[in-house]
Image (cartoon, rainbow, N blue to C red):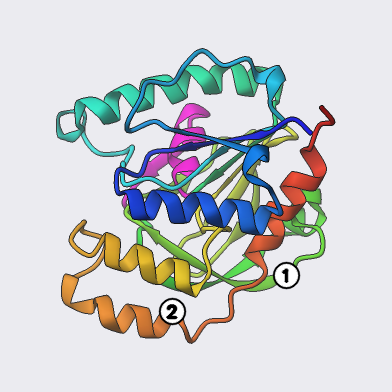
Amino acid sequence: MKPFLLLASRAEDVAAEAEYRSYLRFGGLQDTQLKRIRLEAVPLPELDLSEYSGVIVGGSPFTSSDPPEHKSDTQHRVERELAGLLDRIVEQDFPFLGACYGVGTLGRHQGAVIDRTYGETLGGVTIKLTADGIQDPLLAGMDERFDAFVGHKEACTVLPGHAVLLAGSAACPVQMFRIKQNLYATQFHPELDAEGLALRINTYRYSGYFPPDDAARLITEAYKHTVTEPMKLLRNFVRRYAVPQ
């Protein structure tokens, strides 16, 4: 099949590699079936979307709603490149899945209000599908309520009228939405199990997501959650959009 493309932007090698391996594992993919570009390290090359089955945007330390003067040159570059790519992806309704940072990128691109109103510390939450979510093919076979891991400084406060709300939670009303038929964004992380979250907690201990002294407690709490449903979303994405080579 044609490979999927993972656009990553984690500068920490250990977190970047773990993220990539999680998408392989839970997406049921081989190394040759998931190409990765680390946007924090290299400019986004000109892409021929016809060479790929779909595009995935992973999580990021970047906060899209921060004031421009607080963003690094690298973040400004990445945002420009992703916005340009999304122009093409949205126009073609090309298969897209943005996890966490996908809300900040696809959401802002489509006119959503993205701010810090509904930020959540790293940990497990209960996600509830909407009526549209229950019917959506990307969420087929998933429980109406399920646990997932989150950790984000910003979130979607107001969706544009043409977006379809697929899932929410008590502390964050927009946990997943769809644009057109094939463009998806989740606030929760479909690639994270407890082990993966523990690594993230240790990696980003001093990045402002939570008080550093809370790290050990957050890791203990993570292992109390049974997180198995979100990974089905990745398998569904791969199965639905994989294109024969």
Up/down of 110 relative to 226, above or below = above
Q: Amino acid at mark 1?
A: Glu
**Front of the two marks 1 and 2:** 2
Where does the magenta region start and end? 100-116
Which residue is rendered at x = 81% and y = 64% of the image?
Answer: 141
Quarter occupied by the C terminus: top right
Q: Position of residue 22 (x, y in %)?
A: 55, 57
Q: Residues within 10 Å of mark 1 (few under 14, many from 20)?
A: some
Left or right: residue 208 versus residue 23 is left
**Residue furthest toward the right?**
244
Which residue is rendered at x = 28% and y = 67% of the image?
Answer: 202
Quadrant of residue 126 in the image? Answer: bottom right
**In what element is the residue under mark 1?**
loop
Q: Which residue position holds label 2?
A: 222
Which residue is rendered at x = 44% and y = 44% of the image?
Answer: 101
Quarter occupied by the N terminus: top right
Q: Earlier in the sequence, mark 1 or mark 2?
A: 1
Q: How many marks?
A: 2
Q: Amino acid at mark 2?
A: Ala
**In what element is the residue under mark 2?**
helix
Quadrant of residue 127 in the image? Answer: bottom right
Q: Which residue position holds label 1?
A: 144
Q: Position of residue 204 (x, y in %)?
A: 26, 60
Up/down of 5 relative to 42, above or below = below
Left or right: residue 135 versus residue 14 is right
Left or right: residue 151 versus residue 160 is left
How far apart marks 1 and 2 lie (CA) works out to 21 Å
Which residue is rendered at x = 65% and y = 38% of the image?
Answer: 32
Up/down of 203 relative to 114, above or below = below
